[in-house]
Image: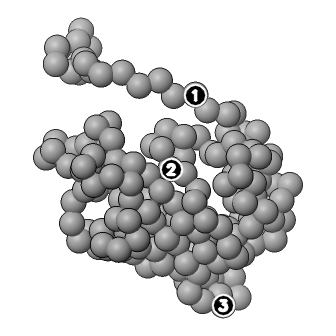
Amino acid sequence: MNQSTDGFQAIDNKRTITWKDPMQVAQDCKEMNGLQYWQAVQLGKISPNPINTLIGISVVEVDRGRIVLAIRPEEYHYGSLGTVQNGLAATLLDTAIGYAVHTTLSVGYKYTLLDINVRYMRPFTRETSIIYCEGIVIHVSGHVVNAGAKIFQGFSKVMGGEKDESIH
């Protein structure tokens, strides 16, 4: 890598990202219940939100209270230790939980994360191939929803997990 004029290291590799206007994505979201919205994203009828596009998250399965996401670890996900940065796992877990909660909500309802607790069990790299993350709603009580998620390699080896509470 070369040193750039602003003091940061110049990047040798390049990746170009194109995404839909996030305000249009939010408008699409407001017009459907959560399950309909994520089913439409899965089928490619509407664009995913920009963060999914940026880091490469795909929606694989959607049911009420459950979603499965997939991502292929790439070089641009790496941290300084030669493995995928743990923040990618945390983001994937957080995303799966939020989307699972969203699938239970009616049109016009919003949610926010109250708590996150992540357990890292093993690192992953580009050689890990596609990893999956399943988010599941565990319990709904009034305005608080308890949900959890796990990351799997090929739906067999657990890579990490979290539990969360969301409020809507």
Taking 95 as reference, is 162 above or below it? below
- The residue that disc 2 covers is 57
* Lower position in the chain sequence, tag 3 or tag 2: 2
Q: Residue at x 69, y 82 (%)?
A: 143
User: Which numbered disc flags the more N-terminal residue, 3 or 1?
Assistant: 1
Left or right side of 84 for 26: right
Q: Which residue is mark 1?
A: 18
| Frontmost residue, 132 versus 112 | 132
Q: Residue at x 67, y 34 (%)?
A: 20
Q: Is there CB contact under 8 Å for labels 3 and 2?
A: no
Q: CA distance from mark 1 to mark 2?
A: 14 Å
Q: Label 3 sits on what residue type? A: Ser
Q: Residues within 10 Å of mark 1 (few under 14, many from 20)?
A: few
Q: Nearer the viewer, residue 71 or 136?
A: 71
Residue, disc 3: 141
- Whether residue 13 is visible, yes or no, is yes
The secondary structure type at the circle numbered 1 is loop
- Viewer-nearest of discs 3 and 2: 2
The x and y percentages for residue 140 are 65, 87
